[in-house]
Amino acid sequence: MTKILIIEDENLAAKRLVKLVEEILPECEIFGNLDTITSAVEWLKNNVQPDLIFLDIQLADGISFEIFEHVKVTSPIIFCTAYDQYAIKAFKLNSIDYLLKPVDPEELKNALHKFQSGRKAPEITLDQIKTLLQPVQKVYKNRFLVKIGERIQTIAIEEICYFYSEDKVTFLMTTQGKKFIVDYTLDEVETMLNPESFFRLNRKYISAVDAIKGVFTYSNSRLKIQLDQCADHDILISREKMQSFKNWLGQ
C-alpha cells in the first residue's frame, strides 16, 4: 500500500487533492493534512517517512523549503504551487515534478504514474530551487472596492482592521468602525492579502496585525483573541493554528 503525506495549508485544496489521489490510487493510505512548517517537521521527525509527499510551497508559517533545513527528507516529492508560469517553466526545465493549483486530474495522474514507474528527477539543491523562485513575487491587493448606496468607494488596506464572514456574506471592518460588504468569499479574500500583515484566525475571521488588541490563553490549549472594533468576545484560535499564529504575531 502506497503511503502518502499531504502538506498543504489550504483546507479545500487539500480535500480536493485527497479525493483525486484516492480515485487514482484507491489502495493508498493518506496522512495529514499538515498545514505548517512546524507541524510537518514534527511529523517527519516522529514517523516513518512515507512513499510520497505532496508539498505545497507556501504554507501557513512560511516557505515549505524550510522543512528541509530541520529534517532530512528522503521521500519523493511532488510540489503543489500557485506560482505563475515563469516559475512553472523553471520547474519544468529542471525536471522537478509539480502540480499547478487548482490541481488538474490528468496532470496528477501523470505525476503519480511517473512516481510509480520509479523515474527520478536529476538532483537539484535547495539553493537552486530557492533561486528559481526568487523572481516570482505575488502581488497583493492594496485596496478593496465597496458599494455605498449607488456610489462605489475604495478602502485602502491600511484602513482595514479585519474581514469576517456572517450568513455566507463577507464583510470588512475599518479602523473607523465602519462595516462594508465585499464581493468575495473569505477564502478568496485570504489569497489576496499579504500574509505578513493578515492572518486567518479561524473560519470566520481574518485579522490585520494592528487590529490584535489582546491575546489570552483559553481552555484546551487554545487562544482567545480581542480585536479592535469588534464586539465578538469568542474569537478563538485552535490548538493546531496556535504556533503559526504566534510565529506570525512575533515576526
Image (tube, rainbow, N blue to C red):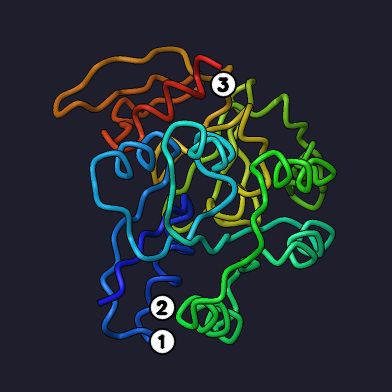
> Is 234 or 219 nearer to us in this picture?
219
Q: Quadrant of residue 32?
A: bottom left
* Foreground: disc 3 or disc 1: 1
Q: What residue would you read off at disc 1?
A: 24
Question: Around disc 1, counting alpha carbons within 10 Å, would you say few (fewer than 14), some (14 to 19), or many (20 or more)?
Answer: some
Toward the left, the furthest residue is 220
Q: Look at label 1 and name its amino acid.
A: Ile
Q: Look at label 3 and name its amino acid.
A: Val
Q: What residue would you read off at disc 3?
A: 209
> Is 110 or 136 nearer to us in this picture?
110
Q: Where is residue 54? Give x, y as percent.
A: 47, 61
Q: Mark 1 falls on what kind of element? A: helix
Q: On screen, 119 above or below 155? A: below
Q: Examine the rendering and report whether any part of residue 207 can be seen.
A: yes
Q: Is residue 157 left or right of residue 239?
A: right
Residue at image point 41% right, 87% down: 24
